[in-house]
Image (tube, coloured by chain):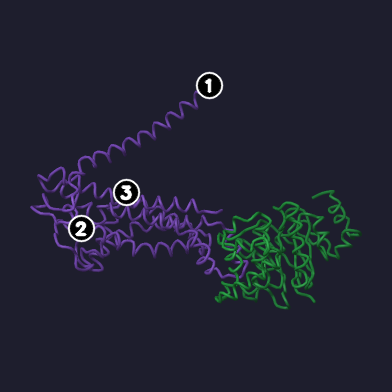
């Protein structure tokens, strides 16, 4: 066959694949926005659910999700970052470190419900934290840990080796080199990975199902040992467990969750873009 | 005065035997030029002197290298590298401003005083013959300088640490002839205060700036003598062939 023709065919398939994705995402977003937007009012965002969650707002779920995400990051970012620094800067390339890296990559693929069960067994039951923000945050944190480690490691390893050599050749110690040269140049990549992890933590239902999420709890939490409602679980509840909830309310909740996750991803994209503009090597 | 004494130095990277039984002395305040074809071990030799080879995986050495009568393996590595600085083959500015590039070393060694840092940066830039060209641009990114300026910036950055020895690893390989002349000028003037060791692929450069010259081939030190002798009456036929351009 004529090479130009095969190229054309290949290109059209590649283009079609992209178009399909674009259309799918577009349709999902469009439907949710169209059906959910009428529900979005100030009251919807700031009121507690009323009349068996058929009316009122979603404030406790929104606040609960924000708490959980914040807790997950407080836990996962330092540990993930330190692990990544160790793996990329200090660990010698041995069979063990390769196994660890492989394990971390694979952890990122573990189904989230498995993390949920793990969190139930370890935090809720074994450590006796009960179903609480603490248990839920820790479970979400563990779930996004591999994501943060992998992103941070890639960011650290993308800092040119020559920068490290220059710094060391000037008599700086290894830790000084990491502090002053490697980390500042890796931070945008680390932030991007972290925010993507946050987005994932905000949207998951399974890990919080057994560890924190409350079916209906109209008051805001008083401490980290309280249960909270959370957006993804609330959406599941009003969509499947409570009869006769307005379509508007369901799609409104979905819209808020979607907006939350998408805006986090947007922030990640902006950071990455700004960094690329500033990158000098 | 002898500053480096190298005694039966062997270096391996994995199974590759890169330096073989190298013994020699390096004197203070001389420019020692090191020549030889690619893969002859010159850069390895240079990087052994301030233990930059330690960063490579599978690096192994035997024999001793004494710096100021002390085995380099017993000197703290950051102290050694402060006293024995490196200028790399390519200009490698750090992703910082011009000022911060030069101030990096002193800052890492604990200098916090702004006035002292400014003085130190100016002195270093003057010694590298760069001050007049860039004194109004100190806060600009170092990446905005030309290649030749970047390389002199790297020299200034090394000088700011106040080393005793400066190792140059083919510092002009990426530069045009005019920038090369400026870097060579700087080296000749630096000789009064520092010991310079220059690895170069450019035989003529070795002849222009060297006091003594060492010729490496396949990891062996074939010959070391005054530059004049090496270039007029070498003892070994292989040295003669190399500087005449018969191979390499």
Q: Position of residue A22 (x, y in %)?
A: 35, 37
Residue ranking furthest to the top: A1
Please tell me whether mark 2 sits on a helix, a strand or a loop. Answer: loop
Q: Residues within 10 Å of mark 3 (few under 14, many from 20)?
A: some
Q: Going by the image, does B102 lie left or right of A21?
A: right
Label 1: few (<14), some (14–19) or many (≥20) C-alpha neighbours in 10 Å: few
Q: Earlier in the sequence, mark 2 or mark 3?
A: 2
Q: Are marks 2 and 3 in contact (CB under 8 Å)?
A: no
Residue A213's mark? 2
Q: Secondary structure at mark 3?
A: helix
Assess disc 2: are there few (<14), some (14-19) or many (≥20) residues with their C-alpha within 10 Å of its C-alpha: many
Residue at x 62% of width, y 68% of height: A170
Chain where mark 3 sits: A
Read off the residue under disc 1.
A2
Q: Which chain is green?
A: B
Q: Colour of chain A?
A: purple
Q: Are marks 1 and 2 on the same chain?
A: yes
Per the image, the residue denoted by label 3 is A262
Going by the image, does B150 lie left or right of B235? left
Decide which of tag 1 and tag 2 comes sooner along the chain: 1
CA–CA distance between discs 1 and 2? 60 Å
């Amino acid at each position: 066959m004529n090479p130009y023709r095969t190229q054309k065919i290949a290109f059209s398939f590649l283009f079609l694949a992209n178009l399909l994705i674009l259309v799918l995402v577009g349709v999902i977003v469009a439907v949710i926005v169209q059906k959910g937007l009428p529900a979005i009012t100030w009251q919807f965002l700031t009121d507690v659910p009323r009349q068996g969650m058929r009316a009122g707002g979603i404030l406790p779920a929104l606040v609960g999700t924000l708490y959980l995400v914040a807790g997950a990051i407080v836990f996962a970012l330092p540990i993930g970052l330190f692990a990544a620094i160790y793996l990329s800067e200090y660990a010698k390339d041995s069979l063990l470190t390769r196994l660890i890296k492989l394990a971390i990559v694979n952890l990122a693929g573990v189904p989230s419900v498995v993390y949920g069960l793990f969190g139930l067994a370890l935090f809720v039951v074994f450590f006796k934290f009960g179903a609480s923000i603490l248990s839920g945050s820790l479970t979400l944190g563990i779930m996004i840990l591999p994501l943060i480690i992998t992103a941070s490691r890639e960011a650290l390893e993308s800092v040119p080796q020559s920068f490290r050599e220059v710094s060391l050749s000037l008599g700086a110690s290894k830790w000084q080199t990491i502090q002053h040269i490697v980390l500042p140049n890796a931070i945008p990549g680390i932030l991007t990975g972290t925010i993507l992890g946050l987005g994932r933590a905000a949207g998951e239902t399974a890990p919080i199902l057994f560890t924190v999420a409350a079916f209906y709890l109209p008051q805001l939490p008083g401490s980290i040992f309280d249960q909270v409602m959370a957006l993804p679980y609330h959406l599941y509840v009003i969509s499947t467990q409570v009869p006769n909830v307005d379509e508007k309310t369901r799609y409104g909740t979905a819209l808020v969750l979607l907006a939350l996750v998408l805006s986090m991803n947007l922030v990640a994209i902006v950071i990455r873009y700004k960094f690329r503009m500033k990158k000098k090597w | 005065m002898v500053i480096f004494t190298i005694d039966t130095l062997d270096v391996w990277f994995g199974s590759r035997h890169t330096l073989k039984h190298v013994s020699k002395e390096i004197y203070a305040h001389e420019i020692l030029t090191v020549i030889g074809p690619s893969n002859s071990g010159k850069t390895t030799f240079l990087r052994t002197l301030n233990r930059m080879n330690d960063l490579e995986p599978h690096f192994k050495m035997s024999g001793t290298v004494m710096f100021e009568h002390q085995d380099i393996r017993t000197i703290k590595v950051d102290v050694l590298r402060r006293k024995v600085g490196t200028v790399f083959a390519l200009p490698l500015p750090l992703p910082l401003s011009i000022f911060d590039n030069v101030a990096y070393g002193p800052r890492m060694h604990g200098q916090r005083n702004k006035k002292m840092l400014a003085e130190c940066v100016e002195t270093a830039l003057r010694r590298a013959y760069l001050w007049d060209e860039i004194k109004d641009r100190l806060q600009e990114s170092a990446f905005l300088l030309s290649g030749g300026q970047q390389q002199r910036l790297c020299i200034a950055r090394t000088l700011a640490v106040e080393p005793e020895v400066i190792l140059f690893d083919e510092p002009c390989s990426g530069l045009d002839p005019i920038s090369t002349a400026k870097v060579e000028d700087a080296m000749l003037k630096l000789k009064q205060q520092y010991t310079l060791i220059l690895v170069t692929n450019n035989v003529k450069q070795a002849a222009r700036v060297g006091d003594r010259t060492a010729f490496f081939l396949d990891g062996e030190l074939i010959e070391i003598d005054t530059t004049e002798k090496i270039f007029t009456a070498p003892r070994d036929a292989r040295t003669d062939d190399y500087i005449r351009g018969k191979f390499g």
